């Protein structure tokens, strides 16, 4: 099997940190941002591919399949609500959206107004990541990638301490 693909949508501080960490973890990495100046090897080094397109147009440019993990670190709920419907039609293994619960509630409301069915909306992990009380972009990237790895490798996300040893 080829390595899993991680698609980072939104090349701000957290997006850049996720790209760096995902590459280090052995993922193929694609970056997408509708601001072309952010979506370059100079601005966001380390990715395998760059897609300076709107989130909603990304599936037209990039094959998203069951080996694809989509991490959305975009600028806001309005960008997410515009772009998510087409991504929710994909076979992505994971779709996560950064932000507060309040931001996600706003996004869900907008998606419902666009007619996106509940079961499709329920695919989204938001707020994404494991609860680490992360604050810096790098810590947030660890939280996000921990959740991605947990789901990809069928882990539990629980501490290792106290885990029973196989006899």
Image (spheres, helix red, strand yellow):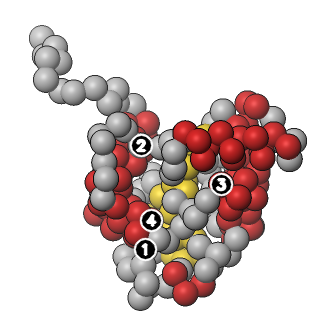
In three-dimensional space, the C-alpha distance between marks 1 and 3, rounded to whole angstroms, equals 25 Å
Residue wearing tag 3: 77
Residue wearing tag 2: 129
Residue wearing tag 4: 15
Alpha-carbon neighbours of circle 4 within 10 Å: few (<14), some, or many (≥20)? many
- Asked where in the image residue 152 lies, by quadrant, the reply is top left
Q: Residue at x 32, y 30 (%)?
A: 157
In three-dimensional space, the C-alpha distance between marks 2 and 1, rounded to whole angstroms, equals 21 Å
Q: Residue at x 28, y 26 (%)?
A: 158
Contact between labelled residues 4 and 2, with CB atoms less than 8 Å apart: no
Residue wearing tag 1: 47
In three-dimensional space, the C-alpha distance between marks 4 and 3, rounded to whole angstroms, equals 16 Å
Look at the numbered disc 2 and give the secondary structure of its residue.
Answer: loop
> Upstream in the sequence, badge 1 or badge 4?
4
Give how far across and how far down residue 55 sits, in percent. Answer: 68, 65
In three-dimensional space, the C-alpha distance between marks 1 and 4, rounded to whole angstroms, equals 11 Å
């Amino acid at each position: 099997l080829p390595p899993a693909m991680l698609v980072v949508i939104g090349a701000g501080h957290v997006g850049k940190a996720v790209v760096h960490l995902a590459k280090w973890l052995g993922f193929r990495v694609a970056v997408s941002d509708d601001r072309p100046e952010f979506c370059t090897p100079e601005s966001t080094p380390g990715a395998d591919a760059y897609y300076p397109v709107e989130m909603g147009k990304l599936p037209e440019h990039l094959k998203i399949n069951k080996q694809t993990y989509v991490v959305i670190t975009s600028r806001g709920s309005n960008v997410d609500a515009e772009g998510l419907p087409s991504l929710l039609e994909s076979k992505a293994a994971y779709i996560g959206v950064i932000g507060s619960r309040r931001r996600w509630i706003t996004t869900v409301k907008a998606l419902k107004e666009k007619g996106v069915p509940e079961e499709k909306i329920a695919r989204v992990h938001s707020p994404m990541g494991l609860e680490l009380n992360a604050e810096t972009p790098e810590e947030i990237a660890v939280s996000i990638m921990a959740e991605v790895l947990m789901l990809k490798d069928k882990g539990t996300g629980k501490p290792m301490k106290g885990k029973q040893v196989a006899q």
